[in-house]
Amino acid sequence: MAAGIGIGRFVYTPILPPMVEALSLSKVQAGLIASANFVGYLAGALLAAVRLPGSRRGWLLAGLVLNVVCLAAMGASTSLPLFLLLRLAAGLASALCLIFSSALVLDRLAATGRGGLSALHFSGVGIGIALSAAAVAMLGDWRNMWFASAALAAIAAIAVVMIVPTDAAPSPTAAHAPRTKLSSAFVMLAVAYFLFGIGYIITATFLIDIVRGSPAIRHLEPYAWVLVGIGAAPSVVLWGALGRRIGILPAFAVASLVEAAGVVASVLWVQTLGVVIAALFLGGTFMGLTALGLMGAREAGEGDPRGRIALMTASFSLGQIIGPVFAGVVYDATGSLVWPSLLAAAGLVLAALLSVGSQRFAPSTASASRAARKPEA
């Protein structure tokens, strides 16, 4: 997770400004590079949803290798078409890493009765973000930033090779299980995940622009994203603990409401305290929601959870693609991000209702959530 998501997916955020300046890229070109990664992420999720030949470990390692190659190649190119292709491929690699590592880890933890440790798996994203941000901050040239990121991802990939057993495969029950039927409960949860994708990405994309465009709080620009990171660092562990106490889906609902409050604060409370709340609430929920949603998808059926995790990831990715485009269109028409942000917040409230509703329509999932709250032996 640290290599494929924390580094492979999010490192372009701190690298992009010096890269744009050095290559004189336009705003449109920079946006296309970012969007290519989201499209690749969606493609990877859809690919992983089908029954691919080979082992889950093999596909995980393939994603990690592709991730390293794409990171290194970004530092060796100056061509916009190649940038787009590489970020597209990197997005695909990130989705493969997320889906196959989650399927392997969550299955292994469930089999050993240590499901509570799943939060540590998802916290790898924050570790990757922190490590790559620290490495990038020490370098001045955008090329070296990509090369350093590739080196960090390679080290993480080697660790996976050493840690994940070569015989890692679905359990006999999962390997022979029929295709997952899309129950009403799972569909409701997937729609909630889609709304989460829209709800978080608008604020994540435009929070710094909002701060920069407001003279009274412009001085907070260097610190706003740091606050997002501070909020993200312990978030998966904390939301995981709440999920064990009250249930995964109720915890998802609470996190959605907290994130909605942060989204509203980002546009209606454009003052120092409002920005602090918006940043902390965004950072403190987006990875927790990601983890809770995937854990909920695993419980929403039987057999190999890869297909359900992949469909959830595709749903989230689609929302993530639509969100910034929708916000940009509304901004061009109105000159404000207030309405798209408020609609995103409303979507998060609806996501909370859907997640609770999906639990009511799935007795087995509710039972699993209650079981997850019991202390481990």
Image (cartoon, rainbow, N blue to C red):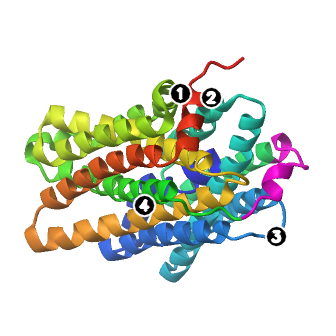
Quick check: marks 2 and 1 in contact, CB under 8 Å?
A: yes
Whole-number angstrom distance, CA of label 2 to CA of label 1:
7 Å
Whole-number angstrom distance, CA of label 2 to CA of label 3:
30 Å
Residue 169 located within the stretch drawn in magenta? yes
List the residue tagged with mark 1: 244
**Residue 53 image label:** 3
Which numbered disc flags the more N-terminal residue, 2 or 1?
2
Whole-number angstrom distance, CA of label 3 to CA of label 1:
35 Å
**Residue 16 image label:** 4
Magenta span of residues: 161-178
Q: Which of pointers 4 and 1 indicates the residue nearer the eye?
A: 1
Whole-number angstrom distance, CA of label 3 to CA of label 4:
36 Å
Secondary structure, mark 3, is loop
| The one of 291 and 331 positioned closer to us in this rendering | 291
Q: Which of pointers 2 and 1 indicates the residue nearer the eye?
A: 1
Q: Is residue 163 left or right of residue 339?
A: right
Residue 203 place in picture, x, y as percent: 28, 52
Marker count (numbered): 4
Q: Which of pointers 3 and 4 indicates the residue nearer the eye?
A: 3
Amino acid marked by disc 2: Gly
Residue 17 place in picture, x, y as percent: 38, 59
When the figure is inspected, residue 55 is found, relative to residue 148, above or below; the finding is below
| The one of 159 and 223 positioned closer to us in this rendering | 159
Residue 193 located within the stretch drawn in magenta? no
Residue at point 81%, 59% (across, down): 58
Secondary structure, mark 1, is helix
Amino acid marked by disc 4: Leu
Amino acid marked by disc 1: Arg
**Which residue of the protein is positioned furthest toward the right in this rendering?**
167
List the residue tagged with mark 2: 116
Which numbered disc flags the more N-terminal residue, 4 or 1?
4
